[in-house]
Image (cartoon, rainbow, N blue to C red):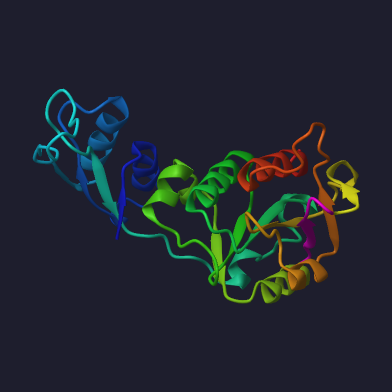
Amino acid sequence: MLTLRNPHSVLAALRTRPKDVQEVRAFSDSNTAWADVVKLAKENKVRVTQPTPSKGPKGQDAGKDGRVGGSEALVKERTGLSLEELFANAERKAGGKGLWLALDSLQDPHNVGAIFRTAAFFGVQGILLTQERSAPITGTTYDVASGGMEYVPFAMQINLVRGMESAKQMGLWTLGTSEHAPESLDTVKRDRAWLLILGNEEQGIRRLTEENCDMLCKIPAQGEVGSLNVSVAAGIFMSHLSR
């Protein structure tokens, strides 16, 4: 069970799977977004309670009313899909085009959440996640995604290369990202379905992952800084490939 503190994440869960929302704890003077959460929760017969105000530790600013903490909700985690379900009919979706993502060993749950939010914005078809050496999907991930976790299908896979092979069998092309790639993003054709692979914050995509990509590309730097945060880079790649 996850504890979510972003009202937009909770609203998305209530709209898509209200039975998985166990409880909403919201103060009576909550902001408009939490008021919407409470209203929708009651409509779906979800338990709504008001937290007991608590005092902060000595010397800590607990706010003008003496409270520590804020509104939150208890929500069940989403269940991931199988590889077959994630890439089902990929070749026929979006007229043979479309975009899927694969995250190769990302460590920061904030980056994962930000990528899910951007993926939901651009209509990404699904995300393949690695189980090992990767950040777990936590309440932080859901809150940073601001609802995006509810709208983008995903699958967890131990062996990323096996996931890439499955994607290829279903008609996708695999596109690796690397600041050392010879090709620019501008050269990537948008007339096909792509599985875009984004690598670890420090090391990038792994060697075996890179060797199994159909193509590698980069975002050419225009200034003195040669690299981008992975979630920022992901947004640029998604914007280009989803046009």
Q: Is residue 175 magenta?
A: yes
Task: Tell me if 103 is positioned left or right of 148 in this view.
Answer: right
Range shown magenta: 171-180
Percent position (x, y) of residue 242?
73, 42
Residue situated in front as seen by the camera: 91 or 79? 79
The correct choice, above or below, for 228 with respect to 84 in the image is above
Percent position (x, y) of residue 60?
18, 34
User: To which quarter of the image does residue 177 belong?
Assistant: bottom right
Furthest-top residue in this view: 64
Task: Tell me if 57 is positioned left or right of 167 in this view.
Answer: left
Query: Which corner quadrant holds the C terminus?
Result: top right
Residue, x 32% and y 59% (percent of image)? 76
Furthest-front residue in this view: 59
Residue, x 77% and y 58% (percent of image)? 176
Q: Is residue 203 magenta?
A: no
The correct choice, above or below, for 41 with respect to 81 in the image is above
Any part of residue 147 in sight? no
Residue, x 58% and y 47% (percent of image)? 115
User: To which quarter of the image does residue 37 belong?
Assistant: top left
Task: Tell me if 137 is positioned left or right of 5 in this view.
Answer: right
Percent position (x, y) of residue 161?
71, 74
The correct choice, above or below, for 170 with respect to 52 in the image is below
Any part of residue 143 in sight? yes
Query: Which corner quadrant holds the N terminus?
Result: bottom left
Residue situated in front as seen by the camera: 170 or 60? 60
